[in-house]
Image: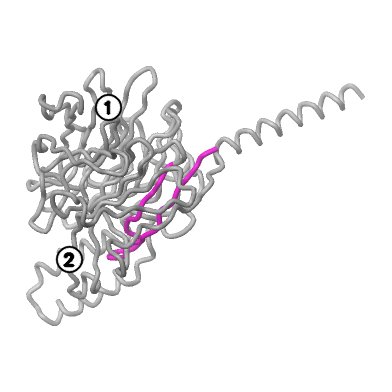
Amino acid sequence: MVRNLRIYILSMLALAVSLTFNHCSRMNIEWSELPPLPPPAPGSIQPGVAGPFAGIHGKTLIVAGGANFQDTMPWHGGKKYYHNDIYTLHLPVNGGPWKSFRGEISLPAPVAYGASASTEAGLVCMGGETEQGLTDEAYIISAAGERLIITPLPPLPVPLSNAASTSVGPTVFVAGGLTSDGSSQALYCLNTEEIAAGWKKLADMPLPLINSVMGASDGKEQKLWLMGGRTRGEDDDISVIRSEIISYSVDDDRWQWEGELNDGKDTLRLAAGTGTALNGRYMVLFGGNDGEVFNRVEKMLSEMGRETDTAVLAKKRREYISLQESHPGFSRQVILYDIETGESLNAGEIPGPAQVTTTAVSTPFGIIIPSGEIRPGVRTDIIRMATFR
C-alpha cells in the first residue's frame, strides 16, 4: 500500500513538472488585432506599408513612412511609392482611433526601410531608402499631447537602409544594413541626452548583416542581441540567409557568437522578420524569410541581367513572374531564444499571413507588429499584438 502510494505521488510530481515545462515552453501567446492602419486621407485606401519607422513614446504608438505598390506589381512595371505620412494610436486602445497627421506634419522626406528605436525622448528614426537612393538622415519624433514634434539629429556616419536597431536607456544602436558599398559590419550609437557628441563607432560585428533582428537585455550585463539576417557579396548571385545569433557587450565593446536559431530541433535561417527582447530573459522572433523562393528569384534576376538571347530572356522572365505570383508567404513561426540558457523553442504561430520588413514594438500592453509585407509586393494594414503569459 505504502509502495503504491509512493509510486502514485512520484508519478503526479513527474506529470506536474512535465505540464509546467510545457506551459513555460509555449508561454501561451495571446493574439489580438488593434484597429488597422487608417487611410492616409479621407476617401483613400490604405494598402499598408513595408519598412515603416515604428515605436512608442509614452503611451503613443507611432508608425511613419514606408513604401508600397499602388498601381500594379513591380514585376509588371509597377512603381514603388515612398511615403512621409505619420500615424499615431493612443494605448491602450479602448476603441480609440488612429490619427493621421497628413496636412499637419510629415517626415522630412518620403522614406522606407530605415531603422527605428524607442527612447524616453521619442522615436528615433535613422536612415532608410528614398526615391533618390539611400539616406543618412536621422531625427526624433516626439508625442506632446495631441501634437508631434520632429527634432533633427546628426546624420548617420553613412547612408544606410535595412539595418537593425534597438535602445538601451537614452542610447540608440544601429547595426549592419546596406550601404552604397554593400552590406555593413558596423555598429554605431548615439546618446539622445548628448546629441552634440554625435554618433560613435563601436566594434564591428563578426560579419556583415542585412535585415537582422536586434534587441537589448538589461540584466547583470547590458547586451545587444542580433538574430538571423542575410549577407550577400558584391559578386554573389544570391544572399546567404543566416542562422547565427551574436551578442554585443555594451560595457566591453565586444561581440561574441552565441549559437544558431532553431525551433528546438532544426536550424532556422531567417531574414527580414521582426522581434524584440522579452521580459529581460528572451529574444522573440516573429516570422521571416527563409530564402527558399527569395534565393531563386535573386539567382534568376542575376541570370537575366547577363542573358543576351531574347528568347531565353523572355522564358526566364515568365519563370520569374510565376515565382513571385505563386509565393506562399513567409514563415509564421514564433521563436523564443532564452538568453540565459542559449536554448531556442517554437512558441507558436502568427495567426495569419506573417508580416516582414516591419518593426516589432515592445509596449506595456504587448508586442505590436504594425503593417509590413505579407508577400512580394503585397502589404497589409493589419496591426497585430502578441501578449506572452
Compared with residue 378, is residue 371 higher up or lower down, i.e. above or below? above
Q: Amino acid at mark 2?
A: Leu
Quadrant in which the N terminus appears = top right
Q: Earlier in the sequence, mark 1 or mark 2?
A: 1
x and y, in percent, of residue 4 in the image:
87, 27
Q: In the structure shown, which secondary structural element does the residue marked by tag 2 occupy?
A: helix
Q: Is residue 105 visible?
A: yes
Residue 291 located left or right of residue 17: left
Cα distance, mark 1 to mark 2?
35 Å
* Magenta span dominant secondary structure: strand
Q: Residue under circle 1?
A: 248
Residue at image location 24% in from the left, 18% down from the top: 252
Image marks 1 and 2: residues in contact by CB distance under 8 Å: no
Q: Amino acid at mark 1?
A: Tyr
Quadrant assignment, res 188: top left
x and y, in percent, of residue 201 in the image:
13, 28
Residue 370 among those drawn in magenta: yes
Q: Residue under circle 2?
A: 301
Residue 305 located left or right of residue 48: left
Report the front residue among 332 and 277.
Answer: 277
**Magenta part of the protein: which range?**
367-389
x and y, in percent, of residue 255 in the image:
25, 27
For the residue carrying disc 1, how many other residues have a C-alpha within 10 Å: few (<14), some (14-19), or many (20+)?
many
Quadrant in which the C terminus appears = top right
Q: Is residue 320 visible?
A: no
Quadrant assignment, res 183: top left
Compared with residue 172, is residue 150 higher up or lower down, i.e. above or below? below
For the residue carrying disc 2, how many other residues have a C-alpha within 10 Å: few (<14), some (14-19), or many (20+)?
some
Residue 230 located left or right of residue 34: left
